[in-house]
Amino acid sequence: MTAVKAINLVLPEVKVYPVGSSICGQLVLNLSSTLVDPVVKMELMGRGYLKWPEGNPELDYEEIIVCTNKAVYISKAKKFHIADSCLDSGIHTFDFHFSFPPEAPSTFIKLAASSIS
């Protein structure tokens, strides 16, 4: 049985963030039992995907090729400091804040708790 009952993210309702903006939220961790020497890490990832066809389907000697371009524009991580060497069972809340780099394009973001052990 796992010690983690649930991981919830409390985020603003904004889905798109322009260059240079910031996001604040909370990671809410619900534990069914005590974690000893836990590491809680939060990652912010901003990815871009583009897909387009190449070729002319009207000409029978050309094939249509679908090209895909993927890029990671933002990759930041934050480790939360745990005051004691354990987290007791129950609900624990961790506040986080990320600032987007000025060179990143506006993008949809996905926030995820990447590591809890």
Image (cartoon, grey):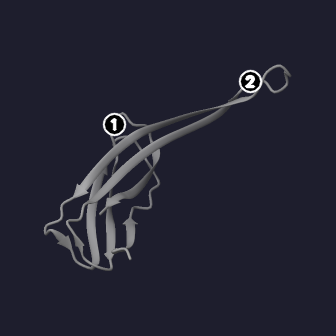
> Taking 110 as reference, is 5 above or below it?
below
> Taking 11 as reference, is 23 above or below it?
above
The picture places residue 60, in percent across and down from the top left corner, at 86, 22
Name the image quarter holding residue 32.
Answer: bottom left
The picture places residue 100, in percent across and down from the top left corner, at 34, 44
In percent of the image, x 22 and y 77: which residue is there? 88
The picture places residue 82, in percent across and down from the top left corner, at 18, 65
Disc 2: CA contacts within 10 A as few (<14), some (14-19) or many (>=20): few
Name the image quarter holding residue 54.
Answer: top right
Relative to the observer, which residue lies in front, 104 or 40? 40
Disc 1: CA contacts within 10 A as few (<14), some (14-19) or many (>=20): few
Q: Name the residue under label 1.
A: 102
Tag 1: amino acid:
Pro
Name the image quarter holding residue 10.
Answer: bottom left
- The quadrant of the picture occupied by the C terminus is bottom left
The picture places residue 85, in percent across and down from the top left corner, at 15, 68
**For marks 2 and 1 on the same chain, the one whose residue lies earlier in the sequence:** 2
> Taking 62 as reference, is 16 above or below it?
below
Tag 2: amino acid:
Gly
Q: Name the residue under label 2.
A: 55
- The quadrant of the picture occupied by the N terminus is bottom left
Q: Distance between the residues labelled 2 and 1?
A: 36 Å
Q: Which mark is residue 113?
A: none
